[in-house]
Image (cartoon, rainbow, N blue to C red):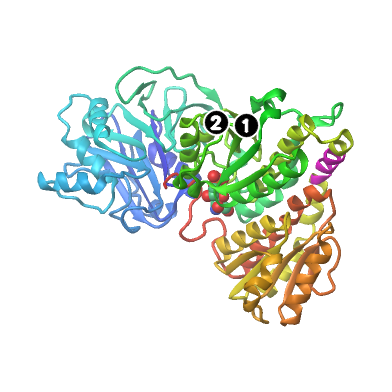
Amino acid sequence: MCGIVGYIGKRDVAPLLLEGLQRLEYRGYDSAGIVITSPKAAGLKMVKAKGRVRDLEARVPKRFTGTTGIAHTRWATHGAPSDINSHPHLDPENKVAVVHNGIVDNAQELRAKLEADGVVFASETDTEVITHLIARSQATSLEEKVREALKVIEGTYGIAVMHADFNDRIVVARNGSPVVLGIGEKEMFVASDVAALIAHTRQVVTLDDGEMATLKADDFRTYTTSGATTTATPETVEWEAASYDMGGHDTYMHKEISEQPDAVDRVLRGRIDDRFSTVHLGGLNLDAREARTIRRIKILGCGTSYHAGLIGAGLIESMARIPADAEPASEFRYRNPVVDPDTLYIAVSQSGETYDVLAAVQELKRKGARVLGVVNVVGSAIAREADGGVYVHAGPEVCVVSTKCFTNTVVAFALLALHLGRIRDLSVTDGKRIIEGLRKLPAQISEILESEEEIKKLAEQYAGAQSMMFIGRVRGYPVALEASLKLKEISYIHAEAYPASELKHGPLALIEPALPTVAIVPNDDLLEKNRAALEEIKARSGRILAVAHQPQEKADHTIVVPKNEDELDPILMGIPLQLFAYHTALAMGRDIDKPRNLAKSVTVE
Ligand code: M6R
């Protein structure tokens, strides 16, 4: 949600920042801007544009040179996408430039006070408040000016600040929105995430909340917002720069769907222990004795991660026989939940940055709960805040809609369920059975991906629908939820997901030839019940596309997927529906990687 990138060194900064913005564009893409300077320049030079980074690039003049700069790609919160509301925001004297990711909660109040003092605002943004506060500070250093401004700011921020009178430095600060420093040879970078840095340096420092940093070309230092020096030891990023390229695919979504066999292989690698028919999860920080005392598991996540959590809860209940459920993290913390000492809480997040999840984790920790993370991005805020957890090792996911991370997260939950199960009541035989099933997954996913042409043809037939229904029972229901979210996110077709068992309690009223139903019909103990639901739909002349282990007589079309163990079937059944959503959206001419109104990494509430 908003991408920030900055550089100070000797290189020509504008092309470097524009390239960084391209890599961060998935964080927000309604407008973008850049401000630059150099040690010898008098003042700051700025260009901003509504639209994509390519629109900004088109506006950058030929002689737009400098060696220090900050840039931003925006997902609007305060004020519509427009040139003027784009970041950076400058003060009227063009001395201070600020880029910001987050929300200033008390912006209205501060704006009123500043206006009463005669300040004229150029934009409708909350960020401009920060610019004016810094510009009006009487402090003698840029660090102190920023610190003074932040003292009155309530809300979340990742900011980068430049000042024409202090043009040997960039000052950055973090509270709730990510800020990563990239440490180079006589050059320094700053960004909202490593995607923008990794082509230049793999040595990074992730700021903590309440931390600030001063970047100079050959030096950096970190300190708290109250001025105390902090220690920052650079870490090496493991992800390769090439993982952020499209790799010959037309979209990141297609690339990421096709990477799933390898991604699943990665989440399994080095974790299976055949001797005891279990798995090793190094970072869990939960010994067997503690694991036996858990009485409940509560999983918290948002969107796709919440859906993965729903499948995860089912896996834990069935393998470990621990009562488990999942809840949207965004709802959890506002209902003053009872925090029980015998409950293990698990926060799920691809990005590890989602504000709603992070805030729920912080609330739980404050109340003394034990919280584990199931996270993709190593060292992200949620991973750092949790007491331990499981990395899902899906590699970078760039497309706004999540595919490979969903699959890997569910596999990570299967590993956790197996681990807990084998500590409790899961037999060696069942442990072996699950391990064999897990090992089959990469090849079975490849087999599903080979049916892409067939799925594409089906998608093209359904692409004209105004609305679609997705149904499934028990394990199949979260698969239906996720498939319907995928379809609506990228095709903008209205889609609803229901437990198949609930059809006759209301949604059956919607069924008619124009409303197709996608049904999840695994070959398990509920097969006949699922078939009965197909009968009910067919009797009302509804069109049916089934995802099943064998062709379904009542369905107009069936996508047949390979059978695994009943517990692991949801992992495979979701995959053809990612391709279905993809090809439906493609047939409708949608912008697959950047769906309207959305952004990856929702770092605001
Ligand atoms: O990074 P997270 O997993 O915490 O993100 C949670 C949701 O915002 C995310 O899954 C969202 O629903 C995606 N657009 C799904 O495709």
Q: Which residue is mark 2?
A: 386
Q: Is residue 140 magenta?
A: no
Q: Nearer the viewer, residue 495 or 263?
A: 495
Q: Which residue extends farthest right?
A: 429
Instruction: Report the magenta stretch's main SS.
Output: helix
x and y percentages locating residue 221 in the rendered image? 37, 20
Q: Is residue 547 left or right of residue 162?
A: right
x and y percentages locating residue 206 in the rendered image? 47, 28
Q: Which residue is mark 1?
A: 389
Amino acid under label 2?
Answer: Ala
Q: Is residue 442 left or right of residue 179?
A: right
Q: Nearer the viewer, residue 185 or 364?
A: 364
Q: Is residue 386 left or right of residue 169?
A: right
Marker count (numbered): 2
Crowding at dot 1, Cα within 10 Å, few <14 / some 14-19 / many 20+, comes out as: many
Residue 556 visible in image: no
x and y percentages locating residue 566 in the rendered image? 82, 51
What residue is at 60 percent from the left and 35 percent from the top?
343
Look at the numbered discs 2 and 1 and tell me whether their residues touch, using CB distance below 8 Å. yes
Crowding at dot 2, Cα within 10 Å, few <14 / some 14-19 / many 20+, comes out as: many
Stretch of the chain drawn in magenta:
433-441
Where residue 296 sits, quadrant-wise, is top right
Secondary structure beneath dot 2 equals loop
x and y percentages locating residue 241 in the rendered image? 58, 37
The answer to whether the residue bearing label 1 lies less than 8 angstroms from the nearest atom of ligand 1 is: no
Residue 132 drawn above or below residue 147: below
Amino acid under label 1?
Answer: Gly
What residue is at 25 percent from the left and 40 percent from the top?
130
Residue 209 visible in image: yes
Residue 429 drawn above or below residue 309: above
What residue is at 27 percent from the left and 33 percent from the top?
150
